[in-house]
Image (cartoon, rainbow, N blue to C red):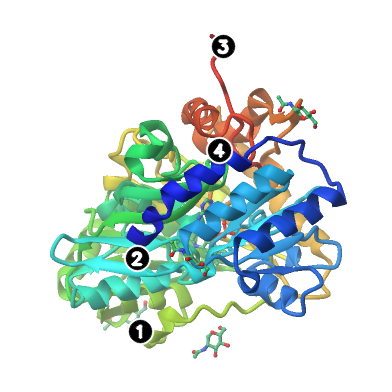
């Protein structure tokens, strides 16, 4: 970043000479002028337009959900692949000057594809794809690291483990190919959350390019914006290039485990018990549940040996019947792969660096939070949903301990004290299948669950983005704060307003906008 900061004065000067706000339309004149501006500001090999031979391969490179890679998907005018901060600043300045909006993509795992597609036909936009900005610099003596947004969490985990001889880790998500940029800016939880909280609880600095093309660190962006990008969704506030994080200690060997239980072997009762046991276990034990078909698979991580874990499980959760055969004593990096893949096989550590994403699973997902245990009868009925035609799956992640111990307003991620667990509903299908029944299954199950989950608002996890929860309504030139409450308070509860105020400070004209970006709120004087 040091080199990038040195470029700042030059760009700040350009900002003054170039910047004039223009209307954001779909005129081809503005597109042509934008591309001409890019050509004169960044090397031509750093962007491709729809007519470039490599456009499709670059576009698809990090798409996770092929639902948004179809002939009717609204695609970007061009994709910029910057190699440093000044390329990003130049792109923003060209976008502002010529009325072309930017969507930023880090790992491309957005559930609704908002980092690379628009819902509105005719919207002209560019994508800034950060895949080339992905270095990780670990300072093991200080237990900190700088990680660029284009790194995957797998790359971060690998670098942290390698740089610390396996003594340090980072508490974030399970899927190794998710991008740091989207994941961190939306929260970021995983197997270490009960011990250490979530990714944003450990961010100590960040570097952001704002809508004026300025490069800002924590102090320069100000307290409110630095608060906002730690869980409020980066895309509303600018382009986060880098994050400095605190790392956390782990033992050289941890214990991963998977205990599958079928309905015939008591899954309903065990699950009913799990709801109160898992959020109250010691903070170094994490037990989530994956529900699929007639099986509840209890998957977990313990920060210690199997020998130390078994007495805890036998006394706190004897119903699970856990024994030594369920334990795998592995390194922390191996534990991530073991639980993520879930096949029962150990996966070589190096695989965590694999950035290739198989483009075969079409999916729709949504989420809930549970604050009161759900009754046994209702769980029995939920298993009938999992046995319907075209069923999906559910993942239950326990909270409590140190994820719950953080005040609701400390970060935009508000799902803290009192949450027992998060539910993720997911339904998958293949190419050529009719998506209708799969999407209907999720929507109907979500409706069925209404009485049993959090209310007023019905909470949802921002990183499990679902456009069914609501979309922005643009009034005049900006997204409406009032209309945004519909989805914003589900994701952020009372933090929605403070996010909108932060947006009003850094981007009052709503340049960085998507279907679920935080609308600006500018207090009347
Ligand atoms: C298979 C799978 C497994 C997952 N597992 C977990 C999990 O274990 N825990 C968890 O918490 N979540 C999980 N998620 C959800 C994941 O955290 C989100 O989808 C996350 O937003 C992905 O980040 P990304 O950079 O890959 O996505 P992108 O699609 O690149 O971006 C997502 C959003 O963030 C914005 N954005 C991206 N980069 C930046 C940036 N640098 N600056 C500003 N805005 C930016 C984008 O514009 C977009 O709106 C999972 C998702 C998938 C598909
Ligand atoms: C950023 O990269 C561009 C093109 O690759 C190069 O021309 C420029 O000098 C770089 N800027 C800095 C500050 O490194
Ligand atoms: C809003 O956009 C219109 C065109 O879409 C433009 O004429 C007007 O100046 C803009 N207003 C502001 C306040 O930016
Ligand atoms: C461990 O539990 C499994 C079932 O979950 C059982 O089949 C196996 O016999 C048990 N092993 C021991 C040593 O108790
Ligand atoms: C990387 O992952 C892809 C998709 O899962 C797989 O096809 C490929 O073989 C993997 N590559 C390596 C080197 O393991």
Residue 14: percent from left, percent from top:
55, 45
Q: Is residue 124 left or right of residue 497?
A: right
Q: Is tag 2's residue or tag 4's residue first in the polypeptide sequence?
A: 4
Give whichever of discs 4 and 1 has the lower sequence position.
Answer: 4
User: Mark 2 and mark 4: span between their CA atoms?
Assistant: 65 Å
Question: What label sits on residue 16 in the rendered view?
Answer: 4
User: Measured from the top left, where is residue 372 in percent x and y?
Assistant: 44, 38
Instruction: Tell me whether the residue at label 1 lies in contact with that at label 3, contact meaning CB atoms closer than 8 angstroms.
Output: no
In the image, 409: left or right of 70? left
The label number, if any, that marks residue 320 in the structure image: 2
Rendered-image quadrant of the N terminus: bottom left
Residue 520 visible in the shown view: yes
- Percent x, y of residue 314: 23, 64
> Mark 4 or mark 3, which is nearer the start of the sequence?
4
Residue to which mark 3 is pinned: 524
The alpha-carbon separation of the residues under discs 3 and 2 comes to 58 Å
Q: Nearer the viewer, mark 4 or mark 1?
A: 4
Q: Nearer the viewer, mark 1 or mark 2?
A: 1
The residue wearing badge 1 is 349
Q: Residue at x 61, y 54 (%)?
A: 91
Residue at 74% across / 36% down in the picture? 22
Q: Nearer the viewer, residue 401 or 242?
A: 242
In this rendering, the label closer to the viewer, 2 or 4: 4
* Quadrant of the displayed image that contains ligand 5: bottom right
């Amino acid at each position: 970043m040091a080199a990038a900061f040195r470029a700042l004065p030059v760009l700040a000067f350009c900002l003054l000479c170039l910047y004039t706000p223009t209307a954001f339309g779909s005129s081809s004149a503005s597109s042509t002028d934008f591309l001409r501006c890019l050509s004169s500001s960044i090397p031509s090999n750093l962007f491709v337009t729809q007519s470039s031979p490599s456009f499709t391969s670059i576009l698809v490179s990090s798409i996770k959900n092929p639902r948004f890679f179809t002939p009717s998907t609204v695609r970007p005018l061009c994709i910029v692949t910057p190699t440093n901060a000044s390329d990003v600043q130049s792109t923003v300045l060209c976008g502002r000057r010529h009325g072309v909006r930017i969507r930023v993509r880090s790992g491309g795992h957005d559930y609704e594809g908002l980092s690379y597609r628009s819902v509105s036909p005719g919207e002209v936009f560019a994508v800034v794809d950060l895949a080339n900005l992905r270095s990780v610099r670990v300072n093991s003596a200080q237990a900190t690291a700088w990680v660029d947004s284009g790194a995957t969490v797998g790359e971060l985990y690998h670098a942290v483990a390698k740089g610390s001889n396996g003594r340090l880790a980072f508490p974030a998500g399970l899927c190794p190919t998710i991008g740091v940029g989207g994941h961190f800016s939306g929260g970021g939880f995983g197997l270490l959350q009960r011990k250490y909280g979530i990714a944003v609880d450990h961010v100590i600095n960040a570097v952001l390019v704002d809508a004026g093309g300025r490069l800002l660190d924590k102090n320069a962006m100000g307290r409110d914006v630095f608060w906002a990008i730690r869980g409020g969704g980066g895309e509303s506030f600018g382009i986060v290039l880098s994050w400095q994080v605190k790392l956390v200690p782990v033992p050289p060997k941890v214990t991963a485990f998977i205990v599958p239980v079928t309905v015939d072997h008591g899954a309903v009762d065990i699950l009913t018990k799990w709801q109160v046991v898992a959020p109250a276990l010691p903070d170094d034990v994490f037990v989530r549940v994956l529900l699929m078909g007639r099986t509840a698979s209890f998957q977990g991580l313990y920060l210690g040996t199997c020998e130390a874990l078994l007495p805890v499980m036998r006394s706190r959760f004897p119903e699970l019947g856990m024994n030594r055969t369920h334990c795998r004593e592995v390194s922390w990096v191996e534990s991530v792969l073991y639980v993520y893949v879930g096949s029962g096989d150990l996966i070589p550590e190096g695989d965590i660096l694999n950035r290739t994403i198989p483009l075969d699973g079409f999916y729709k997902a949504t989420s809930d939070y549970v604050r009161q245990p759900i009754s046994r009868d209702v769980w029995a009925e939920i298993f009938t949903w999992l046995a319907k035609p075209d069923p999906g799956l559910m993942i239950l992640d326990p909270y409590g301990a140190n994820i719950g111990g953080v005040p609701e307003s400390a970060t935009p991620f508000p799902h803290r004290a009192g949450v027992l667990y998060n539910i993720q509903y997911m339904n998958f299908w293949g190419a050529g299948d009719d998506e209708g029944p799969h999407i209907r299954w999720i929507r109907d199950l979500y409706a069925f669950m209404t009485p049993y989950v959090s209310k007023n608002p019905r909470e949802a996890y921002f990183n499990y983005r679902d456009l069914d929860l609501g979309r922005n309504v643009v009034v005049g030139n900006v997204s409406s704060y009032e209309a945004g409450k519909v989805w914003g308070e589900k994701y952020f509860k009372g933090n929605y307003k403070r996010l909108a105020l932060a947006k009003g400070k850094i981007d009052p004209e709503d340049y960085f906008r998507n279907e679920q970006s935080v609308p600006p709120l500018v207090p009347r004087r």
